[in-house]
Amino acid sequence: MKTEKVAAGDRALFLNFANRISPQINRKVHLLASFIEKEKGEGILEMVPTYRSLCIYYDPLRLTLKDLKTKISQIEHELERAKKTPPARVLEIPVVYGGEYGPDLGFVAGSLGLSEEEVIHIHSGRDYLIYMCGFSPGFSYLGGLDKRIATPRLETPRIRVPAGSVGIAEGQTGIYPLESAGGWRLIGRTPLKLFDPYKDPPIPFVPGDYFRFIPISEEEYQKILEKVRRGDYKILVHDSQQGSFSCI
């Protein structure tokens, strides 16, 4: 796969990998970003990975565009020669579905000719790739929603969506990390705090990780929420290749 290198003004360089969205392309975006982070040296200021591209901000007084392109080509060559790449992480996200926590679950199920239990089973039955972050701190753009539960957005967005709400919009699903306005169909809520400015790092995941939604009861939700508030809840993390797990 040939990488297109496009200057964006005199302080940024776009690396475009393809004109389509796929897990394989997104994996290369994040692997290249991690390799550059390790080998960046002077001049590279910041990187912003997206679905299919990587934007690199640099200081032109310390690093020329030509030298940056050369550095990128060298790192790409190293990446191609790497026999083993780091496995992706899979984070377990507990979710209580329906009721006051997911007020649109009934609509989603009814409009698709499914039961609420079937929607929950389908939604929690696969892992979702975090392609990129944006919109608000800690908001993840997830890929992999089953087409059987794809549902249009609300015609009129809600003024207030509680933090932790899990929603569906067209062919995407996601979690609102903060209370905000929003137009996604809400089917559940997680007690986890996915953005905490007082923690380091403030967000417990990175693009390239996966989410796995775990259905829980309202009682379990309240217990986990209390642990989160005390600061002693640990997210269960799986190794996507080995099947081992740890906590963060």
Image (cartoon, rainbow, N blue to C red):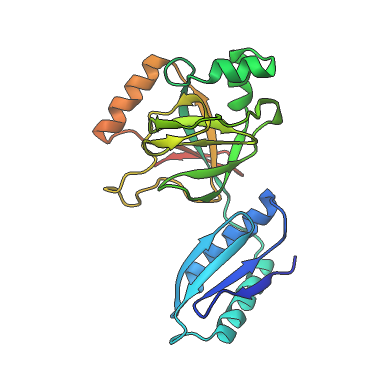
Position of residue 3 relative to residue 128, above or below, is below
**Residue positioned most to the left:** 230
Coordinates of residue 145 in the picture (x, y in percent): 64, 34
Position of residue 242 relative to residue 125, above or below, is below
Q: Quadrant of residue 120?
A: top right
Position of residue 241 relative to residue 175, above or below, is below
Front residue (pair 142, 226): 142
Front residue (pair 87, 44): 44
Coordinates of residue 215 in the picture (x, y in percent): 50, 22
Asked whether residue 101 appears in the rendered view, the answer is yes
Task: Specify the quadrant that holds the C terminus.
Answer: top left
**Residue at the location (74% across, 69% down)?**
2
Asked whether residue 235 appears in the rendered view, the answer is no
Coordinates of residue 136 in the picture (x, y in percent): 42, 47
Q: Quadrant of residue 173?
A: top right
In the drawing, does residue 54 fall left or right of residue 224? right
Coordinates of residue 51 in the picture (x, y in percent): 61, 54
Q: How many marks?
A: 0
**Residue at the location (40% across, 16% down)?**
218
**Residue positioned most to the right:** 1
Task: Specify the quadrant that holds the N terminus.
Answer: bottom right
